[in-house]
Amino acid sequence: HGFSRSVCSSLHTFTFTDCAIIYSCDAWDILTHVCVTEEKEHDGQLDFEEFVHYLQDHEKDLKLVFKSLDRKIAGQVNANDVMNSLRDLGVHISLQQAERVLQSMDKNGTMTIDWNEWKKYPTLQPAENIPEIILYWKHSTIFDVGENMMVPDEFTSEEHMTGMWWRHLVAGGGAGAVSRTCTAPLDRLKVLMQVHGSHGNNMCIMSGLAQMIKEGGMRSLWRGNGVNVIKIAPESALKFMAYEQIKRLMGSSQETLGITERFLAGSLAGVIAQSAIYPMEVLKTRLALRKTGQYKGISDCAKHILKGEGASAFYKGYVPNMLGIIPYAGIDLAVYETLKNTWLQRYGTENADPGVFVLLACGTVSSTCGQLASYPLALVRTRMQAQAAVEGASQVSMTGLFKQILKTEGPTGLYRGLTPNFLKVIPAVSISYVVYEHIKTTLGVQSR
């Protein structure tokens, strides 16, 4: 009664059986954890009643976890149960790996564990807390490379109730705005190279930047960035809301979707969000290509397009844009899942926190692969959006543009502007991540 720090630190082990649960591990590890959660009087001491209360609550948690694993209600858990439960969390392990998990808990060599074996297993090692590992990856998709604003694909029920989800979206939107503004010159250069680049006009990075500065000064490097930043908020919000609704329509009662379901839900959510904000994509391209004094601003550009070309002009390039979402989302997700699972299988048992470098590397590589696959469609989309803005350009269809580019410029013509696009990936992702973490801290969101 009245355990103090000086007394606890002198103990090596502590065995307690009054609550029908046995722990045999370092006493200070247990009591430090208990003091954080159960010490009510804040007097630096943990009394007997507080300790019993903690053990009772902890045993309830253990029973809930055991019941979630024991789906057949057989009173015991086997390797398949462990493998299926981890799959629901998004972690795919082999049967052999699941058997190794059981071996560390199985005392009688039956390769199954019952409640008595489960409750006696030490559960305070954070590196073995698989749900905590998964939470790192759930919120690791706030990466913005100026093309697509990724939204965290899953939130816990607690985050929905406490409003943490909108704080994540606000932090992601703010991070996207800063990163896009910092990399806007490279983004505008990419658009110019996509539209004006050819064998006759072999624009490179330095000549393109010099041409922009000569035509409109330093401020011209940021043309089109305003609308690019403005569209972050509606695109992120629509994508998140659509994703949540699509998950419900799929009839999934689980918080975590499988990779196929997530690909379908993410692609459909992207199509819905892009369809709603697509006119802003057209405005971004036109503003990036405008000459000095051509438009007074975003609204003036919209008025000129509506008056001169009609409302249909705001959806030019819509088809290749929508088609590009499928390879981008599919490859991005597949590469990300592969890298994530590889890391978890190799190092997840040693360290629950993947660290900033791992998250940035996985997000950067997966986004880059997705962009590489969808880039020809993005180039054709941009040219279709810009056709009326280019002097003497005829209105060519998507298939017509593909044939024209392949005939006059060859396969490499479909990748005009790829260099500045890739040059902005690492700084965009890095800036986005740093700003995201700072805004999360300001809004009171704990980093996982």
Image (tube, rainbow, N blue to C red):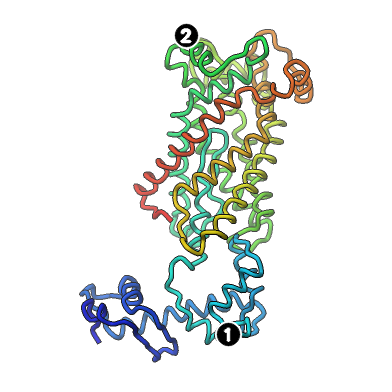
> What residue lies at 56% left-to-right and 24% top-to-bottom?
284
Instruction: Determine crowd level at label 2: few under 14, some 14-19, many 20+ residues with C-alpha closer than 10 A.
Output: few
Identity, as a three-letter code, of the amino acid under mark 2: Lys
Instruction: Name the residue carrying label 2.
Output: 214
- Mark 2 or mark 1, which is nearer the start of the sequence? 1
Q: Residue 21, position in %: x, y?
A: 44, 86
Number of disc labels: 2
Q: Residue 59, position in %: x, y?
A: 45, 81
Relative height, residue 343 to residue 267 (above, below): below
- Relative to residue 55, is residue 206 drawn left or right? right
Comparing 431 with 12, the one in front is: 12
- Residue 325: numbered disc: none
Identity, as a three-letter code, of the amino acid under mark 1: Asp
> What residue lies at 62% left-to-right and 39% top-to-bottom?
369
Name the quarter where the N terminus is drawn.
bottom left
Name the quarter where the C terminus is drawn.
bottom left
Instruction: Name the residue carrying label 1.
Output: 114
